[in-house]
Image (spheres, rainbow, N blue to C red):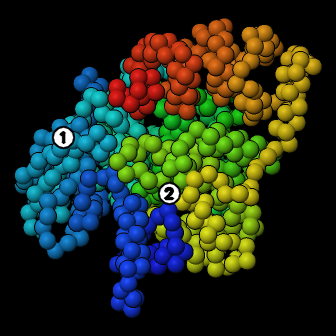
Amino acid sequence: MMSRLLFTSLFVGALALAGGCAKSEPPNTSDRADSPASTAADADSQHASAAMPESGVDYHSLANTGDYRVQHLDLDLTVDFERKVLEGEAVLQVERLTDENPPLVLDTRDLEIEQVKAGQGGDMAPVKFRLGEKDSHLGTPLEIQLPQGATSVSIAYRTSPGASGVQWLEPRQTAGKKHPFLFTQAQPTHARSFVPLQDSPQVRITYKATIRTPKALRAVMSANNDPKAEKDGVYEFEMPQPIPSYLIALAVGDLEFKPMGERTGVYAEKVLLDAAAKEFEDTESMLEATEKVYGPYRWDRYDLLILPPSFPFGGMENPRLSFITPTVIAGDKSLVALIAHELAHSWSGNLVTNASWRDLWLNEGFTTYLTNRIMQLIYGDERYRMEMALGYDDLQADLADRPDKDEIMAIDLRGRDPDEAFSNIPYEKGSLFLYELEQKVGRENFDRFLLDYFNHFSFQSITTEDFLAYLEKTLLKQYPDKLDAARVRQWIYEPGIPEGAPHPMSDAFSKLDPVRQQWLDGKIRAGDIDTQGWTFHQWKYFLDGMPEKLSAEQLKELDAAFGLTESKNNEVAFSWLMIAVRNDYQPAYARLESFLTGIGRNKFVRPLYRAMVETGKKDEAARIFENAKAGYHPLTVKVNSRVIYGDEQG
């Protein structure tokens, strides 16, 4: 660890990185003139260093990971739907990193701690503990007084009914309408709301779990699920590969299983099972294609769990069992790039992980790049170009709407909610950066680099500076005539996109521009546009390229010609509803309300609420939100409360 950080420091210093900082020794100034100029330079250097986040430091964990590292977790939890709590015991196996005996500090959020025991092996006795001061972003530190030499800690606890990482759904909020449903969402810092632990992505653990449920329901986890397990109310799990805490995941519901291939299958409520299995039947082919390019899949199985529509994200890459929103079941496989994305995380994110949320681009930029490559391998070049072009447009929209400090890939999140790291910057800007590297050194060479990168850092959590040090030893050394270290750091540490960056485009889109313009100019009618064979990508491009303002007659004509208000494709419906809100198109408002109350995916609901507020419809947005929030995930409630009511009430 020390040698890697030292090398990183030397590399970063040699490149004179202006936007990042690595842990390093103080500079040696013994052979420099002690002049006012050098003294001033030293002062400026120290000031700049203090102004930058320190590489390898997780500013969003209260745990003392420099004194102790949790190695393994044993969970025994009872799922109580009536009280909306998880209750039981967490046993942590701890490695001591110091000869001293400081208190062990763990991350918690709104946990009720009943008792703590500590000792060696199974020989444990009660010990003193205390909960510290609560922080709005970080939660509450749990400080435990360990006996000398103790390496095992047992914590009896229960969660809060309002735990930020747990959503409890009534039967009416599920697809089947008969049984309740529970699911967790730990990323980025919500694992601490249902398990007391070191909630930092730089800490990797193995775990075992016993989950006790009502007998009619099935429990599944980011672990070795057994679809044939009897519904007896007790489920056993094991995750033998070390994972960061944000990948611990649990769901409980009236779930059934259907295989899609030798290593892939889908869990879902019965009414969704067949449609989901059909929609995502190419998952096995995606898995096999990715292995051929980027190395073996190291997690045994890759299954999908289809969640209720309140899930706040498109998907979550929980190892062995990706959690997926039902909003991507379109009936035509048009939205399966989401599956490719979550699968790609099995290499970029789960296998090689960002060490802090500042380094999120290492997870999401690599994964977005891999997603596009997987889509090309399975669905061909045209689909690949369309996915790339839409991603580029999404990035441009974010760049136009964010302050400079939030356009930096290695983002400074000190004192901020880590949820603020999630935007198209780490995803699409990160992907575009890797695409430029591919274009400069050649695809075959870049694929070899990625394969070696995944193998080199497998089951490790790394920083931006670790990546840069590796890049210096590999591609920058191998291709000095094609790659430039200064440009690399410009991508990572400066806002915007460097001049001359690639601009992905698609012929399938460019031919739509004159058609859209002809309609806007009144030269053709909407009904005369030949849309036969259009993919969702083309519909989205066509709609997203419309001007901010359209006339009532134009809106009515588009809707009548294409039935946009009633579109069953959620991506198309979202693009159309954004147009409707901006232009106060009342015929779409009933669909707008049903869309906002029926879906909790923040990609959709946040921009719609924001557009309503910005166009003077705050009261209407608040009314819909208050009716819908009982079915939203806590994260969705938090984010959209801020949008509608402002930061203070949010």
- Give the image location of residue 3, x and y in percent: 40, 79
Near-viewer residue (393 or 107): 393
**Dot 1 amino acid type:** Tyr
Residue 46 location, x and y as percent?
37, 70
* Amino acid type shown at disc 2: Ala
Can residue 572 be seen at all in this image of the molecule?
A: yes
Q: Residue 292, located in which quarter of the rendered image?
A: bottom right
In the structure shown, which secondary structural element does the residue marked by tag 2 occupy? Answer: loop
Image quarter where the C terminus lies is top left
Q: Is residue 453 left or right of residue 311?
A: right
Marking on residue 343? none
> Dot 2 corresponds to which residue?
410
Alpha carbon separation for disc pair 2 and 1: 36 Å
Query: Is 79 in front, or is 52?
Result: 52
Name which residue lies at 74% across and 67% down. 440
Is residue 163 placed above or below 200 in the rendered structure? above
> In the image, which is nearer the foreground, mark 2 or mark 1?
2
Taking 11 as reference, is 529 above or below it? above
Instruction: Look at the numbered disc 1 and give the secondary structure of its residue.
Output: strand
Q: Position of residue 31 (x, y in %)?
A: 39, 92
Up/down of 94 relative to 115, above or below: below
Q: Quadrant of residue 370?
A: bottom right
Residue ID for mark 1? 157
Left or right of residue 14: residue 552: right
Is any part of residue 347 visible from this angle? no
Callout 1: 10 Å neighbours few (<14), some, many (20+)?
many
At label 2, counting other C-alpha atoms closer than 10 Å, the crowd grade (few under 14, some 14-19, many 20 or more) is many
- Picture coordinates of residue 95 (x, y %)? 24, 66
Looking at the picture, does residue 402 appear above or below residue 105? above
